[in-house]
Amino acid sequence: MPMKTSSVLISRSQIADRVRELAMKITQDYSPRLKANESLLVVSVLKGSFVFAADLVRQLNLPCEIDFIEASSYGAGTQSSGDVKILKDLRGNMESRHVLVVEDIVDTGLTITRLLQLFKTRNPSSIRLCAFLHKPSRSEVPVTIDYLGFTIEDKFVVGYGLDVNERFRECPDLVVYQEAK
Ligand code: XMP
Ligand code: MG
């Protein structure tokens, strides 16, 4: 599935600047909250957030642990149904931990809402959401995004970890996907 044009929506340098700002804010917020023996548990939602999470944790000036969860939302085609299946669960426990969930994109909001509901049953000390992208025009349920990279229009985007049928995750820029005719 070749792309016709690669129209860069957000360049790698814009992304790097924003990641640095977000990391500074997260560091400021959590530094006073973490006790001497505590670390921040960063939960990267696979697969889309793996690039963002990797960049973010390397800019945090905090003791961190990182874990991964993979979920799939069932639905017709590209529509999220909110019926979320856990394909790969966390290795560790989040009970009594400060948890930062890192997501690639909040679209309808259904997937992350289900995941946050699940995490809350696991009794973390606190839980916050950091999302690289938000498409508010497609929102179906309200989601509080504590740390947000960018708000975008309703366009299908790939790169920086995001894919179409598993392609283009490796692209360093965020690009609007246009199928070749
Ligand atoms: P919700 O449940 O919020 O689903 O609708 C969010 C998930 O949908 C995928 N998604 C995208 N993936 N480009 C992508 O590569 C997009 O523009 C896009 N919009 C939604 C993504 O997996 C996200 O976690
Ligand atoms: Mg995803």
Image (tube, rainbow, N blue to C red):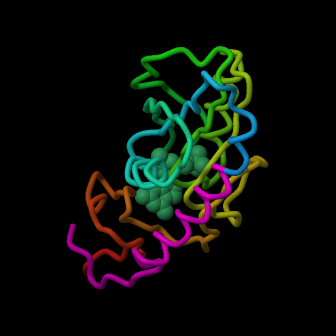
Query: Who is closer to the viewer here, 136 or 76?
Result: 136
Task: Tell me if residue 47 comes above or below residue 64 in the rendering.
Answer: below
Q: In the drawing, does residue 46 fall left or right of residue 79?
A: left
Query: Who is closer to the viewer here, 84 or 97?
Result: 97
Image: magenta residue range: 1-27
- Say whether residue 24 is magenta: yes
Q: In the drawing, does residue 89 fall left or right of residue 123?
A: left
Q: Residue at the spot x=57%, y=61% of the render?
A: 133
Task: Tell me if residue 44 comes above or below residue 16 in the rendering.
Answer: above
Q: In this figure, what is the number of numbered marks?
A: 0
Residue 34 percent across, percent down from the top left: 68, 31
Task: Tell me if residue 99 comes above or below residue 146 in the rendering.
Answer: above
- Say whether residue 6 is magenta: yes
Q: Residue at the spot x=70%, y=63% of the render?
A: 136
Residue 142 percent across, percent down from the top left: 79, 49
Q: Confirm whether residue 113 shows in the render.
A: yes
Task: Tell me if residue 105 comes above or below residue 155 in the rendering.
Answer: above
Q: Residue at the spot x=70%, y=39% of the render?
A: 128
Q: Could you say which quadrant of the image residue 52 lies in? A: bottom left
Hey, which residue is sitting farthest front in the picture?
36
Query: Who is closer to the viewer here, 109 or 149?
Result: 149
Q: In the drawing, does residue 28 fall left or right of residue 175?
A: right
Q: Residue at the spot x=68%, y=42% of the render?
A: 31
Quarter of the image with the N terminus is bottom left
Q: Confirm whether residue 79 shows in the render.
A: no
Residue 25 percent across, percent down from the top left: 68, 56
Residue 3 percent across, percent down from the top left: 26, 76
Quarter of the image with the C terminus is bottom left
